[in-house]
Image (cartoon, rainbow, N blue to C red):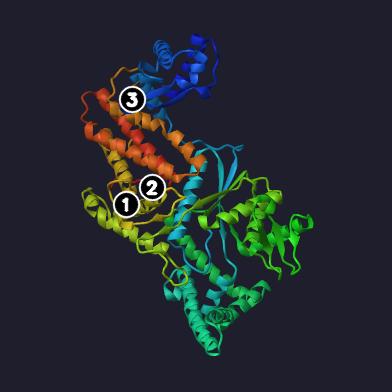
Amino acid sequence: MNIEAQICSSVIAAVKELYGQEIPSKMVALQKTRSDFEGSLTLVVFPLLKTSKKKPEDTAQEIGDYLKANCEAVADFNVVKGFLNLVIAPAAWLGLLQDIDKDEKWGCKTATADSPLVMIEYSSPNTNKPLHLGHVRNNLLGWSLAQIMEANGNRVVKTNIVNDRGIHICKSMLAWQKWGNGETPETSGKKGDHLIGDYYVAFDKHYREEVKELKAKFVAEGMDEEKAEERAKNEAPLIVEAHEMLVKWEQNDPEVRALWQKMNDWVYAGFDETYKALGVSFDKIYYESNTYLEGKKKVEEGLQKGLFFRKEDNSVWADLSADGLDQKLLLRSDGTSVYMTQDIGTADMRFKDFPIDKMIYVVGNEQNYHFQVLSILLDRLGFKWGKELVHFSYGMVELPNGKMKSREGTVVDADDLIASMIENAKQLSEDKVNKLEGISEEEKNEIARIVGMGALKYFILKVDARKNMLFNPEESIDFNGNTGPFIQYTHARIRSILRKAQGTEPLTPCSPSLAPCSLPLAPKEIDLIQKLSEFPAAVEQAGTDYSPSGIANYCYELTKQFNQFYHDHSILGADTEEQKAVRLLIAKNVAKTIKNGMALLGIEVPERM
Protein backbone atom coordinates (compact mmCIF):
# COMPACT_ATOMS: atom_id res chain seq x y z
CA MET A 1 0.00 0.00 0.00
CA ASN A 2 1.47 3.41 -0.93
CA ILE A 3 1.88 6.21 1.60
CA GLU A 4 -1.22 8.15 0.56
CA ALA A 5 -3.35 5.01 0.73
CA GLN A 6 -2.00 4.21 4.23
CA ILE A 7 -2.78 7.72 5.45
CA CYS A 8 -6.22 7.73 3.83
CA SER A 9 -7.08 4.44 5.55
CA SER A 10 -5.79 5.76 8.89
CA VAL A 11 -7.77 9.02 8.58
CA ILE A 12 -10.97 7.03 8.00
CA ALA A 13 -10.17 4.96 11.11
CA ALA A 14 -9.40 8.14 13.09
CA VAL A 15 -12.72 9.77 12.19
CA LYS A 16 -14.61 6.61 13.17
CA GLU A 17 -12.83 6.33 16.52
CA LEU A 18 -12.81 10.05 17.36
CA TYR A 19 -16.24 11.05 16.06
CA GLY A 20 -18.14 7.77 15.69
CA GLN A 21 -18.87 8.06 11.98
CA GLU A 22 -17.84 6.19 8.83
CA ILE A 23 -16.68 8.46 5.98
CA PRO A 24 -15.99 7.59 2.32
CA SER A 25 -12.42 7.84 1.06
CA LYS A 26 -13.40 10.71 -1.27
CA MET A 27 -13.78 12.91 1.81
CA VAL A 28 -10.09 12.44 2.63
CA ALA A 29 -8.44 15.31 0.74
CA LEU A 30 -4.66 14.92 0.63
CA GLN A 31 -2.36 17.26 -1.25
CA LYS A 32 1.33 18.06 -1.45
CA THR A 33 2.46 20.30 1.43
CA ARG A 34 3.38 23.84 0.49
CA SER A 35 7.15 24.38 0.39
CA ASP A 36 7.03 27.04 3.13
CA PHE A 37 5.66 24.51 5.69
CA GLU A 38 7.25 21.45 7.24
CA GLY A 39 5.86 18.18 5.93
CA SER A 40 5.28 16.29 2.69
CA LEU A 41 1.51 15.66 2.60
CA THR A 42 -1.31 17.85 3.88
CA LEU A 43 -4.77 16.71 4.97
CA VAL A 44 -7.42 19.34 4.23
CA VAL A 45 -9.63 19.17 7.31
CA PHE A 46 -12.56 21.35 6.21
CA PRO A 47 -14.58 18.49 4.59
CA LEU A 48 -14.51 16.69 7.98
CA LEU A 49 -15.87 19.54 10.14
CA LYS A 50 -19.53 18.52 9.79
CA THR A 51 -18.54 15.12 11.16
CA SER A 52 -16.25 16.37 13.97
CA LYS A 53 -18.51 19.34 14.91
CA LYS A 54 -15.33 21.08 16.09
CA LYS A 55 -13.13 23.96 15.01
CA PRO A 56 -10.69 23.29 12.12
CA GLU A 57 -7.60 23.60 14.36
CA ASP A 58 -9.03 21.24 17.02
CA THR A 59 -10.09 18.67 14.43
CA ALA A 60 -6.66 18.77 12.77
CA GLN A 61 -4.89 18.41 16.14
CA GLU A 62 -6.98 15.39 17.17
CA ILE A 63 -6.56 13.61 13.85
CA GLY A 64 -2.82 14.44 13.88
CA ASP A 65 -2.41 12.92 17.35
CA TYR A 66 -4.24 9.78 16.21
CA LEU A 67 -2.13 9.41 13.06
CA LYS A 68 1.16 9.90 14.89
CA ALA A 69 0.19 7.18 17.38
CA ASN A 70 -1.41 4.72 14.93
CA CYS A 71 -0.02 5.23 11.41
CA GLU A 72 3.56 4.05 10.84
CA ALA A 73 3.93 6.35 7.83
CA VAL A 74 3.44 9.50 9.96
CA ALA A 75 6.44 10.62 12.06
CA ASP A 76 5.14 14.05 13.08
CA PHE A 77 2.65 16.76 12.16
CA ASN A 78 1.86 20.45 12.46
CA VAL A 79 -1.43 22.31 12.21
CA VAL A 80 -1.96 25.48 10.19
CA LYS A 81 -5.61 26.53 10.53
CA GLY A 82 -7.64 23.87 8.71
CA PHE A 83 -4.61 22.12 7.26
CA LEU A 84 -2.84 19.16 8.88
CA ASN A 85 0.72 18.97 7.54
CA LEU A 86 2.18 15.48 7.89
CA VAL A 87 5.88 14.62 8.23
CA ILE A 88 6.41 11.18 6.71
CA ALA A 89 8.72 8.67 8.45
CA PRO A 90 11.97 7.87 6.57
CA ALA A 91 11.17 4.14 6.68
CA ALA A 92 7.90 4.84 4.82
CA TRP A 93 9.73 6.75 2.08
CA LEU A 94 12.33 4.01 1.75
CA GLY A 95 9.64 1.34 1.64
CA LEU A 96 7.90 3.28 -1.14
CA LEU A 97 11.19 3.61 -3.02
CA GLN A 98 11.71 -0.15 -2.87
CA ASP A 99 8.17 -0.76 -4.14
CA ILE A 100 8.89 1.55 -7.08
CA ASP A 101 12.16 -0.26 -7.72
CA LYS A 102 10.45 -3.65 -7.95
CA ASP A 103 8.21 -2.49 -10.81
CA GLU A 104 10.08 -2.14 -14.11
CA LYS A 105 6.94 -0.68 -15.73
CA TRP A 106 6.37 1.72 -12.86
CA GLY A 107 3.38 3.97 -13.51
CA CYS A 108 1.99 1.92 -16.40
CA LYS A 109 -0.90 -0.56 -16.28
CA THR A 110 -1.16 -3.67 -18.44
CA ALA A 111 -4.24 -4.36 -20.55
CA THR A 112 -6.18 -7.61 -20.25
CA ALA A 113 -8.49 -9.37 -22.71
CA ASP A 114 -11.42 -7.55 -21.07
CA SER A 115 -9.86 -4.07 -21.20
CA PRO A 116 -11.65 -1.40 -23.28
CA LEU A 117 -10.59 -1.26 -26.93
CA VAL A 118 -9.58 2.23 -28.01
CA MET A 119 -9.01 3.00 -31.68
CA ILE A 120 -6.88 6.05 -32.49
CA GLU A 121 -6.79 7.52 -35.99
CA TYR A 122 -3.88 9.73 -36.92
CA SER A 123 -1.71 10.80 -39.88
CA SER A 124 -4.42 10.88 -42.63
CA PRO A 125 -2.09 11.89 -45.48
CA ASN A 126 -2.97 12.74 -49.08
CA THR A 127 -1.19 10.71 -51.76
CA ASN A 128 -0.38 13.81 -53.84
CA LYS A 129 2.40 15.17 -51.60
CA PRO A 130 4.96 14.18 -48.98
CA LEU A 131 4.39 14.57 -45.25
CA HIS A 132 5.13 18.03 -43.84
CA LEU A 133 5.57 19.71 -40.45
CA GLY A 134 1.81 19.66 -39.78
CA HIS A 135 1.78 15.89 -40.35
CA VAL A 136 4.74 15.57 -37.98
CA ARG A 137 2.73 17.12 -35.14
CA ASN A 138 -0.26 14.92 -36.01
CA ASN A 139 1.76 11.69 -36.09
CA LEU A 140 3.68 12.45 -32.90
CA LEU A 141 0.49 13.34 -31.03
CA GLY A 142 -1.31 10.23 -32.31
CA TRP A 143 1.54 7.86 -31.47
CA SER A 144 2.05 9.36 -28.00
CA LEU A 145 -1.67 9.26 -27.26
CA ALA A 146 -1.70 5.56 -28.19
CA GLN A 147 1.16 4.85 -25.75
CA ILE A 148 -0.60 6.83 -22.99
CA MET A 149 -3.91 5.02 -23.50
CA GLU A 150 -2.07 1.67 -23.39
CA ALA A 151 -0.28 2.73 -20.19
CA ASN A 152 -3.72 3.34 -18.68
CA GLY A 153 -4.66 -0.30 -19.26
CA ASN A 154 -6.53 -0.01 -22.55
CA ARG A 155 -6.16 -2.20 -25.59
CA VAL A 156 -5.24 0.13 -28.46
CA VAL A 157 -5.56 -0.10 -32.24
CA LYS A 158 -3.56 2.52 -34.15
CA THR A 159 -5.15 3.32 -37.48
CA ASN A 160 -4.64 5.56 -40.50
CA ILE A 161 -7.01 6.69 -43.24
CA VAL A 162 -5.19 7.50 -46.48
CA ASN A 163 -6.81 10.10 -48.75
CA ASP A 164 -5.98 8.31 -51.99
CA ARG A 165 -8.76 9.53 -54.31
CA GLY A 166 -10.20 12.78 -55.58
CA ILE A 167 -9.35 15.71 -57.81
CA HIS A 168 -6.06 16.51 -56.00
CA ILE A 169 -4.74 13.03 -56.82
CA CYS A 170 -5.74 13.42 -60.46
CA LYS A 171 -3.84 16.71 -60.65
CA SER A 172 -0.54 14.95 -59.84
CA MET A 173 -1.37 12.09 -62.21
CA LEU A 174 -2.17 14.43 -65.09
CA ALA A 175 0.96 16.52 -64.53
CA TRP A 176 3.12 13.37 -64.56
CA GLN A 177 1.47 12.24 -67.80
CA LYS A 178 2.15 15.60 -69.45
CA TRP A 179 5.63 16.45 -68.19
CA GLY A 180 7.00 13.32 -66.52
CA ASN A 181 8.68 11.62 -69.50
CA GLY A 182 8.34 8.30 -67.65
CA GLU A 183 10.26 9.53 -64.60
CA THR A 184 10.26 7.15 -61.60
CA PRO A 185 11.67 7.30 -58.06
CA GLU A 186 14.54 5.08 -59.26
CA THR A 187 15.46 7.21 -62.30
CA SER A 188 15.08 10.50 -60.42
CA GLY A 189 16.75 9.41 -57.18
CA LYS A 190 13.82 10.90 -55.27
CA LYS A 191 11.52 9.35 -52.71
CA GLY A 192 8.19 8.52 -54.34
CA ASP A 193 6.15 10.94 -52.25
CA HIS A 194 8.54 13.78 -53.12
CA LEU A 195 8.39 12.95 -56.82
CA ILE A 196 4.59 13.02 -56.87
CA GLY A 197 4.56 16.18 -54.77
CA ASP A 198 6.72 17.89 -57.38
CA TYR A 199 4.12 17.12 -60.05
CA TYR A 200 1.33 18.47 -57.82
CA VAL A 201 3.26 21.74 -57.60
CA ALA A 202 3.92 21.64 -61.37
CA PHE A 203 0.18 21.24 -62.06
CA ASP A 204 -0.60 24.26 -59.92
CA LYS A 205 2.05 26.37 -61.64
CA HIS A 206 0.74 25.61 -65.14
CA TYR A 207 -2.89 25.90 -64.00
CA ARG A 208 -2.26 29.39 -62.60
CA GLU A 209 -0.75 30.47 -65.91
CA GLU A 210 -3.79 29.17 -67.79
CA VAL A 211 -6.17 30.92 -65.41
CA LYS A 212 -4.24 34.17 -65.78
CA GLU A 213 -4.41 34.02 -69.59
CA LEU A 214 -8.10 33.09 -69.68
CA LYS A 215 -9.02 35.75 -67.16
CA ALA A 216 -7.26 38.42 -69.23
CA LYS A 217 -9.15 37.20 -72.32
CA PHE A 218 -12.57 37.30 -70.54
CA VAL A 219 -11.88 40.75 -69.07
CA ALA A 220 -10.90 41.98 -72.55
CA GLU A 221 -14.30 40.70 -73.74
CA GLY A 222 -16.00 42.93 -71.16
CA MET A 223 -16.54 40.57 -68.21
CA ASP A 224 -15.90 41.97 -64.71
CA GLU A 225 -12.75 40.73 -62.97
CA GLU A 226 -14.36 38.57 -60.27
CA LYS A 227 -16.61 36.70 -62.72
CA ALA A 228 -13.74 36.41 -65.20
CA GLU A 229 -11.49 34.77 -62.62
CA GLU A 230 -14.20 32.34 -61.47
CA ARG A 231 -14.94 31.33 -65.06
CA ALA A 232 -11.22 31.00 -65.87
CA LYS A 233 -10.70 28.70 -62.88
CA ASN A 234 -13.52 26.41 -64.04
CA GLU A 235 -12.68 26.44 -67.76
CA ALA A 236 -8.88 26.23 -67.72
CA PRO A 237 -7.96 23.20 -69.89
CA LEU A 238 -5.89 21.57 -67.15
CA ILE A 239 -8.67 21.54 -64.55
CA VAL A 240 -11.15 20.30 -67.17
CA GLU A 241 -8.78 17.43 -68.01
CA ALA A 242 -8.28 16.65 -64.32
CA HIS A 243 -12.05 16.39 -63.80
CA GLU A 244 -12.34 14.15 -66.86
CA MET A 245 -9.65 11.91 -65.37
CA LEU A 246 -11.56 11.78 -62.06
CA VAL A 247 -14.72 10.67 -63.90
CA LYS A 248 -12.71 7.93 -65.64
CA TRP A 249 -11.32 6.87 -62.28
CA GLU A 250 -14.86 6.66 -60.85
CA GLN A 251 -15.82 4.53 -63.87
CA ASN A 252 -12.91 2.15 -63.23
CA ASP A 253 -11.11 3.03 -66.46
CA PRO A 254 -8.27 0.44 -66.54
CA GLU A 255 -5.60 2.83 -67.86
CA VAL A 256 -6.37 5.55 -65.30
CA ARG A 257 -6.63 3.02 -62.47
CA ALA A 258 -3.28 1.43 -63.41
CA LEU A 259 -1.54 4.83 -63.38
CA TRP A 260 -3.24 5.71 -60.07
CA GLN A 261 -2.07 2.44 -58.48
CA LYS A 262 1.49 2.83 -59.75
CA MET A 263 1.88 6.40 -58.51
CA ASN A 264 0.22 5.64 -55.17
CA ASP A 265 2.62 2.73 -54.61
CA TRP A 266 5.53 5.14 -55.08
CA VAL A 267 4.01 7.44 -52.48
CA TYR A 268 3.35 4.65 -49.94
CA ALA A 269 6.98 3.54 -50.13
CA GLY A 270 8.02 7.13 -49.42
CA PHE A 271 5.56 7.48 -46.54
CA ASP A 272 6.88 4.28 -44.96
CA GLU A 273 10.41 5.70 -44.84
CA THR A 274 9.17 8.86 -43.11
CA TYR A 275 7.02 6.92 -40.63
CA LYS A 276 10.02 4.74 -39.76
CA ALA A 277 12.21 7.81 -39.17
CA LEU A 278 9.50 9.32 -36.94
CA GLY A 279 9.17 6.04 -35.04
CA VAL A 280 5.44 5.64 -35.69
CA SER A 281 3.40 2.82 -37.17
CA PHE A 282 -0.17 1.58 -37.58
CA ASP A 283 -2.04 -1.61 -36.84
CA LYS A 284 -4.52 -1.08 -39.67
CA ILE A 285 -4.60 1.26 -42.67
CA TYR A 286 -7.82 2.20 -44.45
CA TYR A 287 -8.10 3.83 -47.88
CA GLU A 288 -10.73 6.32 -48.97
CA SER A 289 -10.95 4.58 -52.34
CA ASN A 290 -12.55 1.69 -50.43
CA THR A 291 -14.44 3.53 -47.71
CA TYR A 292 -16.37 6.05 -49.81
CA LEU A 293 -18.53 3.32 -51.38
CA GLU A 294 -19.32 1.91 -47.91
CA GLY A 295 -20.29 5.43 -46.84
CA LYS A 296 -22.72 5.78 -49.73
CA LYS A 297 -24.34 2.49 -48.71
CA LYS A 298 -24.77 3.63 -45.10
CA VAL A 299 -26.28 6.94 -46.23
CA GLU A 300 -28.73 5.11 -48.50
CA GLU A 301 -29.68 2.87 -45.55
CA GLY A 302 -30.21 5.94 -43.38
CA LEU A 303 -32.36 7.46 -46.12
CA GLN A 304 -34.59 4.37 -46.22
CA LYS A 305 -34.97 4.48 -42.43
CA GLY A 306 -36.02 8.14 -42.54
CA LEU A 307 -32.85 9.37 -40.83
CA PHE A 308 -31.93 11.57 -43.82
CA PHE A 309 -33.88 13.24 -46.62
CA ARG A 310 -33.54 13.78 -50.37
CA LYS A 311 -33.96 17.18 -52.02
CA GLU A 312 -35.52 17.83 -55.44
CA ASP A 313 -32.10 17.92 -57.11
CA ASN A 314 -31.53 14.33 -55.87
CA SER A 315 -28.94 15.34 -53.22
CA VAL A 316 -29.15 13.67 -49.77
CA TRP A 317 -29.01 15.68 -46.55
CA ALA A 318 -29.15 15.29 -42.78
CA ASP A 319 -31.31 17.75 -40.83
CA LEU A 320 -29.40 18.66 -37.66
CA SER A 321 -31.62 21.54 -36.54
CA ALA A 322 -32.80 19.52 -33.50
CA ASP A 323 -29.14 19.45 -32.40
CA GLY A 324 -28.76 23.19 -32.83
CA LEU A 325 -26.91 22.86 -36.15
CA ASP A 326 -27.86 23.30 -39.83
CA GLN A 327 -28.47 20.83 -42.64
CA LYS A 328 -25.52 18.75 -43.78
CA LEU A 329 -24.91 17.48 -47.33
CA LEU A 330 -24.14 13.72 -47.48
CA LEU A 331 -24.48 12.90 -51.19
CA ARG A 332 -24.30 15.41 -54.06
CA SER A 333 -27.03 15.57 -56.68
CA ASP A 334 -24.90 13.47 -59.05
CA GLY A 335 -24.60 10.78 -56.36
CA THR A 336 -20.95 11.45 -55.51
CA SER A 337 -19.82 11.43 -51.90
CA VAL A 338 -18.40 14.16 -49.66
CA TYR A 339 -15.83 13.82 -46.85
CA MET A 340 -18.59 13.20 -44.30
CA THR A 341 -19.85 10.24 -46.35
CA GLN A 342 -16.34 8.79 -46.49
CA ASP A 343 -15.91 9.13 -42.73
CA ILE A 344 -19.21 7.32 -42.17
CA GLY A 345 -18.01 4.52 -44.48
CA THR A 346 -14.66 4.29 -42.71
CA ALA A 347 -16.41 4.12 -39.33
CA ASP A 348 -18.65 1.31 -40.60
CA MET A 349 -15.66 -0.71 -41.86
CA ARG A 350 -13.77 -0.18 -38.61
CA PHE A 351 -16.73 -1.18 -36.49
CA LYS A 352 -17.04 -4.40 -38.47
CA ASP A 353 -13.30 -5.08 -38.08
CA PHE A 354 -12.97 -4.28 -34.34
CA PRO A 355 -15.26 -4.22 -31.27
CA ILE A 356 -14.44 -0.55 -30.61
CA ASP A 357 -15.33 0.93 -27.21
CA LYS A 358 -13.87 4.38 -27.88
CA MET A 359 -12.86 6.12 -31.11
CA ILE A 360 -10.33 8.97 -31.04
CA TYR A 361 -9.67 11.09 -34.15
CA VAL A 362 -6.41 13.06 -34.12
CA VAL A 363 -7.27 15.89 -36.52
CA GLY A 364 -6.54 19.62 -36.59
CA ASN A 365 -8.91 22.14 -35.00
CA GLU A 366 -10.11 23.44 -38.38
CA GLN A 367 -12.23 20.26 -38.47
CA ASN A 368 -14.04 20.84 -35.12
CA TYR A 369 -17.44 21.32 -36.77
CA HIS A 370 -16.95 18.29 -39.01
CA PHE A 371 -16.47 15.96 -36.04
CA GLN A 372 -19.33 17.52 -34.12
CA VAL A 373 -21.57 16.58 -37.05
CA LEU A 374 -19.95 13.16 -37.54
CA SER A 375 -20.62 12.27 -33.90
CA ILE A 376 -24.34 13.04 -34.29
CA LEU A 377 -24.63 11.13 -37.58
CA LEU A 378 -22.81 8.03 -36.31
CA ASP A 379 -25.02 8.00 -33.23
CA ARG A 380 -28.13 8.20 -35.42
CA LEU A 381 -26.82 5.33 -37.55
CA GLY A 382 -26.45 3.15 -34.43
CA PHE A 383 -22.71 3.15 -33.72
CA LYS A 384 -22.43 2.62 -29.96
CA TRP A 385 -19.37 4.87 -29.68
CA GLY A 386 -20.69 7.52 -32.06
CA LYS A 387 -22.06 9.92 -29.48
CA GLU A 388 -18.90 9.74 -27.41
CA LEU A 389 -16.31 9.82 -30.19
CA VAL A 390 -13.34 11.96 -29.24
CA HIS A 391 -12.01 14.57 -31.62
CA PHE A 392 -8.45 15.13 -30.34
CA SER A 393 -8.34 18.63 -31.76
CA TYR A 394 -4.92 20.22 -32.04
CA GLY A 395 -3.65 23.61 -33.17
CA MET A 396 -1.53 24.47 -36.17
CA VAL A 397 2.25 24.39 -36.10
CA GLU A 398 4.27 27.09 -37.83
CA LEU A 399 7.90 28.05 -38.26
CA PRO A 400 9.29 31.47 -37.36
CA ASN A 401 9.10 32.48 -41.04
CA GLY A 402 5.37 31.80 -41.36
CA LYS A 403 2.71 29.40 -42.64
CA MET A 404 3.09 26.57 -45.12
CA LYS A 405 1.36 26.18 -48.49
CA SER A 406 1.39 22.80 -50.23
CA ARG A 407 0.35 23.92 -53.71
CA GLU A 408 3.15 26.47 -53.89
CA GLY A 409 5.78 24.00 -52.78
CA THR A 410 6.65 26.05 -49.68
CA VAL A 411 5.86 23.39 -47.08
CA VAL A 412 8.35 22.37 -44.42
CA ASP A 413 9.09 18.87 -45.59
CA ALA A 414 9.10 16.23 -42.84
CA ASP A 415 12.11 14.36 -44.26
CA ASP A 416 14.18 17.53 -44.57
CA LEU A 417 13.21 18.55 -41.03
CA ILE A 418 14.18 15.15 -39.60
CA ALA A 419 17.54 15.16 -41.43
CA SER A 420 18.37 18.71 -40.29
CA MET A 421 17.47 17.94 -36.65
CA ILE A 422 19.79 14.92 -36.64
CA GLU A 423 22.58 16.91 -38.29
CA ASN A 424 22.17 19.75 -35.77
CA ALA A 425 22.34 17.22 -32.91
CA LYS A 426 25.49 15.71 -34.36
CA GLN A 427 27.21 19.09 -34.58
CA LEU A 428 26.13 20.29 -31.15
CA SER A 429 26.98 17.07 -29.33
CA GLU A 430 30.27 16.40 -31.13
CA ASP A 431 32.39 17.81 -28.31
CA LYS A 432 30.51 15.84 -25.66
CA VAL A 433 30.60 12.61 -27.65
CA ASN A 434 34.28 12.94 -28.45
CA LYS A 435 35.02 12.87 -24.72
CA LEU A 436 33.69 9.31 -24.55
CA GLU A 437 36.40 6.73 -25.03
CA GLY A 438 36.17 4.09 -27.69
CA ILE A 439 32.99 5.36 -29.32
CA SER A 440 32.52 4.31 -32.93
CA GLU A 441 31.28 6.50 -35.76
CA GLU A 442 28.21 4.31 -35.91
CA GLU A 443 27.44 4.98 -32.24
CA LYS A 444 28.02 8.71 -32.72
CA ASN A 445 25.45 8.69 -35.53
CA GLU A 446 23.00 6.71 -33.41
CA ILE A 447 23.34 9.14 -30.50
CA ALA A 448 22.80 12.06 -32.93
CA ARG A 449 19.66 10.37 -34.27
CA ILE A 450 18.26 9.75 -30.77
CA VAL A 451 19.04 13.29 -29.62
CA GLY A 452 17.85 15.01 -32.80
CA MET A 453 14.56 13.11 -32.88
CA GLY A 454 14.16 13.57 -29.12
CA ALA A 455 14.56 17.32 -29.56
CA LEU A 456 11.97 17.44 -32.34
CA LYS A 457 9.42 15.24 -30.59
CA TYR A 458 9.73 16.80 -27.16
CA PHE A 459 9.51 20.38 -28.43
CA ILE A 460 6.26 19.56 -30.23
CA LEU A 461 4.72 17.37 -27.53
CA LYS A 462 5.49 19.60 -24.53
CA VAL A 463 3.03 22.19 -25.88
CA ASP A 464 -0.66 21.83 -25.02
CA ALA A 465 -2.01 20.17 -28.17
CA ARG A 466 -4.98 22.53 -28.36
CA LYS A 467 -2.73 25.55 -28.87
CA ASN A 468 -1.16 26.79 -32.09
CA MET A 469 2.60 26.56 -31.77
CA LEU A 470 5.77 27.97 -33.23
CA PHE A 471 8.43 25.34 -33.87
CA ASN A 472 11.94 26.69 -33.47
CA PRO A 473 14.54 24.04 -34.45
CA GLU A 474 17.47 25.87 -32.82
CA GLU A 475 15.66 26.33 -29.52
CA SER A 476 14.49 22.69 -29.45
CA ILE A 477 17.95 21.18 -29.47
CA ASP A 478 19.39 23.12 -26.52
CA PHE A 479 21.00 20.94 -23.82
CA ASN A 480 19.60 23.26 -21.12
CA GLY A 481 16.06 24.18 -20.16
CA ASN A 482 12.79 22.45 -20.99
CA THR A 483 14.04 20.41 -23.95
CA GLY A 484 14.35 16.78 -24.96
CA PRO A 485 18.18 16.80 -24.99
CA PHE A 486 18.26 18.18 -21.41
CA ILE A 487 16.17 15.23 -20.20
CA GLN A 488 18.09 12.73 -22.33
CA TYR A 489 21.42 14.05 -21.05
CA THR A 490 20.28 13.68 -17.44
CA HIS A 491 19.29 10.06 -18.12
CA ALA A 492 22.69 9.38 -19.69
CA ARG A 493 24.43 11.04 -16.72
CA ILE A 494 22.54 8.82 -14.24
CA ARG A 495 23.37 5.70 -16.24
CA SER A 496 27.04 6.72 -16.16
CA ILE A 497 26.91 7.09 -12.36
CA LEU A 498 25.29 3.67 -12.02
CA ARG A 499 27.91 2.07 -14.29
CA LYS A 500 30.69 3.54 -12.14
CA ALA A 501 28.98 2.28 -8.98
CA GLN A 502 28.46 -1.18 -10.42
CA GLY A 503 31.87 -1.51 -11.96
CA THR A 504 30.45 -3.67 -14.74
CA GLU A 505 28.32 -3.08 -17.80
CA PRO A 506 25.47 -3.66 -18.36
CA LEU A 507 24.24 -2.63 -14.92
CA THR A 508 22.74 -5.37 -12.79
CA PRO A 509 19.94 -4.43 -10.39
CA CYS A 510 21.28 -2.67 -7.30
CA SER A 511 18.43 -2.96 -4.84
CA PRO A 512 19.88 -3.13 -1.32
CA SER A 513 17.61 -4.09 1.51
CA LEU A 514 16.90 -0.74 3.11
CA ALA A 515 13.80 -1.34 5.22
CA PRO A 516 13.31 -1.28 8.07
CA CYS A 517 15.69 1.65 8.20
CA SER A 518 15.72 4.88 10.18
CA LEU A 519 18.37 6.54 8.01
CA PRO A 520 17.55 10.25 7.93
CA LEU A 521 16.75 11.51 4.45
CA ALA A 522 17.68 14.92 3.06
CA PRO A 523 14.71 17.06 1.97
CA LYS A 524 15.74 16.79 -1.69
CA GLU A 525 15.89 12.98 -1.40
CA ILE A 526 12.35 12.97 0.00
CA ASP A 527 11.23 15.35 -2.77
CA LEU A 528 12.58 12.96 -5.42
CA ILE A 529 10.93 9.87 -3.93
CA GLN A 530 7.67 11.81 -3.65
CA LYS A 531 8.00 12.98 -7.28
CA LEU A 532 8.60 9.39 -8.40
CA SER A 533 5.47 8.32 -6.52
CA GLU A 534 3.43 10.85 -8.54
CA PHE A 535 4.21 9.25 -11.91
CA PRO A 536 1.22 6.83 -11.97
CA ALA A 537 -1.13 9.76 -11.26
CA ALA A 538 0.54 11.79 -14.04
CA VAL A 539 0.01 8.91 -16.50
CA GLU A 540 -3.62 8.53 -15.41
CA GLN A 541 -4.26 12.28 -15.74
CA ALA A 542 -2.66 12.35 -19.20
CA GLY A 543 -5.02 9.55 -20.25
CA THR A 544 -8.05 11.34 -18.84
CA ASP A 545 -7.11 14.64 -20.48
CA TYR A 546 -5.65 13.12 -23.70
CA SER A 547 -2.55 15.15 -22.92
CA PRO A 548 0.97 14.12 -23.99
CA SER A 549 2.12 17.54 -22.72
CA GLY A 550 1.27 16.40 -19.17
CA ILE A 551 3.82 13.58 -19.47
CA ALA A 552 6.41 15.91 -21.00
CA ASN A 553 6.01 18.37 -18.16
CA TYR A 554 6.29 15.59 -15.55
CA CYS A 555 9.53 14.32 -17.14
CA TYR A 556 10.97 17.84 -17.13
CA GLU A 557 10.03 18.48 -13.49
CA LEU A 558 11.51 15.13 -12.39
CA THR A 559 14.70 15.82 -14.35
CA LYS A 560 15.01 19.32 -12.93
CA GLN A 561 14.54 18.01 -9.37
CA PHE A 562 17.20 15.33 -9.88
CA ASN A 563 19.71 17.88 -11.16
CA GLN A 564 19.07 20.10 -8.14
CA PHE A 565 19.58 17.08 -5.86
CA TYR A 566 22.75 16.03 -7.71
CA HIS A 567 24.13 19.57 -7.45
CA ASP A 568 23.74 19.50 -3.65
CA HIS A 569 24.51 15.87 -2.81
CA SER A 570 27.26 13.50 -3.91
CA ILE A 571 26.03 10.02 -4.81
CA LEU A 572 29.25 8.03 -5.16
CA GLY A 573 30.95 10.16 -2.49
CA ALA A 574 28.20 9.81 0.11
CA ASP A 575 29.23 9.77 3.80
CA THR A 576 28.18 6.17 4.44
CA GLU A 577 27.62 3.04 2.37
CA GLU A 578 23.97 3.03 3.48
CA GLN A 579 23.49 6.61 2.30
CA LYS A 580 25.25 5.78 -0.98
CA ALA A 581 22.94 2.80 -1.50
CA VAL A 582 19.86 4.95 -0.93
CA ARG A 583 21.04 7.61 -3.38
CA LEU A 584 21.95 5.03 -6.02
CA LEU A 585 18.49 3.50 -5.69
CA ILE A 586 16.87 6.92 -6.05
CA ALA A 587 19.04 7.67 -9.12
CA LYS A 588 18.31 4.28 -10.68
CA ASN A 589 14.57 4.82 -10.39
CA VAL A 590 14.71 8.39 -11.63
CA ALA A 591 16.45 7.06 -14.77
CA LYS A 592 13.86 4.29 -15.11
CA THR A 593 10.95 6.71 -14.73
CA ILE A 594 12.46 9.17 -17.20
CA LYS A 595 12.84 6.30 -19.68
CA ASN A 596 9.26 5.10 -19.11
CA GLY A 597 7.88 8.63 -19.34
CA MET A 598 9.78 9.58 -22.46
CA ALA A 599 8.74 6.29 -24.09
CA LEU A 600 5.13 7.46 -23.72
CA LEU A 601 6.15 10.38 -25.94
CA GLY A 602 7.84 8.06 -28.42
CA ILE A 603 11.26 9.39 -27.35
CA GLU A 604 14.31 7.18 -26.85
CA VAL A 605 16.89 7.95 -24.15
CA PRO A 606 20.55 7.08 -24.76
CA GLU A 607 22.78 5.23 -22.31
CA ARG A 608 25.46 7.83 -22.84
CA MET A 609 25.89 11.18 -24.53
Q: Nearer the viewer, residue 40 or 597?
A: 40
Name the residue that disc number 3 marks.
512
Q: Identity of the amino acid at label 2?
A: Glu
Mark before the other along the chain sequence, 2 or 3 = 3
C-alpha span from label 2 to label 3 = 28 Å
Q: Residues within 10 Å of mark 1 (few under 14, many from 20)?
A: many
The residue tagged with tag 3: helix, strand or loop? loop
Q: Which mark is residue 447?
A: 1
Question: Helix, strand or loop at disc 1?
Answer: helix
Residue at (53% x, 80% y) in the render? 229
Residue 117 image offset from top left, x and y in percent? 60, 43
**Disc 2 and disc 3 in contact, CB within 8 angstroms:** no
Q: Earlier in the sequence, mark 1 or mark 3?
A: 1
* Marked residue nearer the N-terminal end (1 or 2): 1
Report how far apart the C-alphas of labels 1 and 3 lie in the structure.
Answer: 32 Å
Which residue lies under the disc numbered 2? 604
SS under mark 2:
loop
**Residue type indicated by callout 3:** Pro
